[in-house]
Image: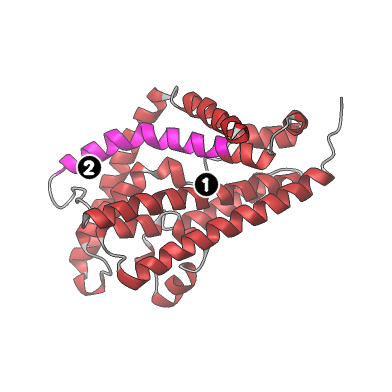
Amino acid sequence: MKKYKTYFSFFRIRFNMGLQYRVAAVSGAVTQILWGLMECLAFMAFQESDPEAYPMALSATVSYIWLREAFFSAFTTWNADEDIFDSIVNGGIAYELCRPVSVYHMWFAKTVAARVAGAGLRCVPLLTVAFLLPRPLRLMLPKSPVHFALFVITLLLGLGVTVAFCMFTYILAFFTISPQGLRMLFTSMIDFLSGAIIPLPFMPNAVRKVVELLPFAGMFNVPLLIYSGELAGTEMFRSIGMQCFWLITLVVSGRVLCKAAERKIVVQGG
């Protein structure tokens, strides 16, 4: 129990630090509101031009966009923790290894805290505006209380998958001179494959079926489609199962890789 209190302390300290950047959060929320409006109008034009080819209900697409913008800070991979990368590159990791705690669990707690704090500051004003907009730009209510409950559960699972994958990026930085190449590769790949750029239902069926088997679909795609009811029945529970599978797989393999990196790390200087 004492061990868990230690990691909760790391979470609380990092969470409180994240709440300090209120002005940046407000300006970011304004930017995302404008971006969300632009995307909604673009998808509306697409739907009006060819309704037969549109794979989702327009209201579901609009809700997907607003929820994605509201929780963008929690799921995007480009806003990785710079302090962690700096500690690896500059040798500050030596101090982290001297602590009687697991580096993996400590970084996991800090990363979750930073993402929750960032999303918490932005989601309230953004969702408020989205609910007050006129139709068809308005964020719809969840399809049912059950769908909302599953949305919250899958949102937390998606956050876990996102953080677990970020941990891989941190750990792989042990084996490189600079982590910038890895970050650029993973950010570009995940933004596209997670549904952060376009919802996965807009992809060709053959491509979408493959992408849905990867861990990235469980980040944005699953919770946002469940909210609107676009993902239901057997397919919904299969997607939740995939989220659980990838969360466990990424955490276990990440811990193993972290242990291997700790055994081989060399810090120059003194």
Nearer the observer, 252 or 141: 252
Q: Residues within 10 Å of mark 2 (few under 14, many from 20)?
A: many
Q: What segment carries the magenta color?
A: 109-133
**CA separation, marks 2 and 1?**
24 Å
Residue 28 position within the rendered picture, expressed as x and y whole percent measured from the top left: 38, 33
Tell me whether the residue at label 2 lies in contact with that at label 1, contact meaning CB atoms closer than 8 angstroms. no
Residue 227 position within the rendered picture, expressed as x and y whole percent measured from the top left: 28, 55
Q: Is residue 136 above or below residue 267?
A: below
Residue 4 position within the rendered picture, expressed as x and y whole percent measured from the top left: 58, 35
Q: Secondary structure at mark 2?
A: helix
Check the image and tell me how it is coloured: secondary structure
At label 2, the amino acid type is: Ala
In magenta stretch: residue 75: no
- Residue depicted at 21% across the width and 74% down the height: 52
- Residue depicted at 34% across the width and 40% down the height: 32
At label 1, the amino acid type is: Thr
Which residue sits furthest bottom? 206
| Picture quarter with the N terminus | top right
| Picture quarter with the C terminus | top right
Q: Which mark identifies residue 77?
A: 1
Pointer 2 residue: 130
Q: Mostly what secondary structure, the magenta segment?
A: helix
In magenta stretch: residue 127: yes
Q: Is residue 136 above or below residue 103?
A: below
Residue 66 appears in the figure = yes
Q: Is residue 231 left or right of residue 95?
A: left
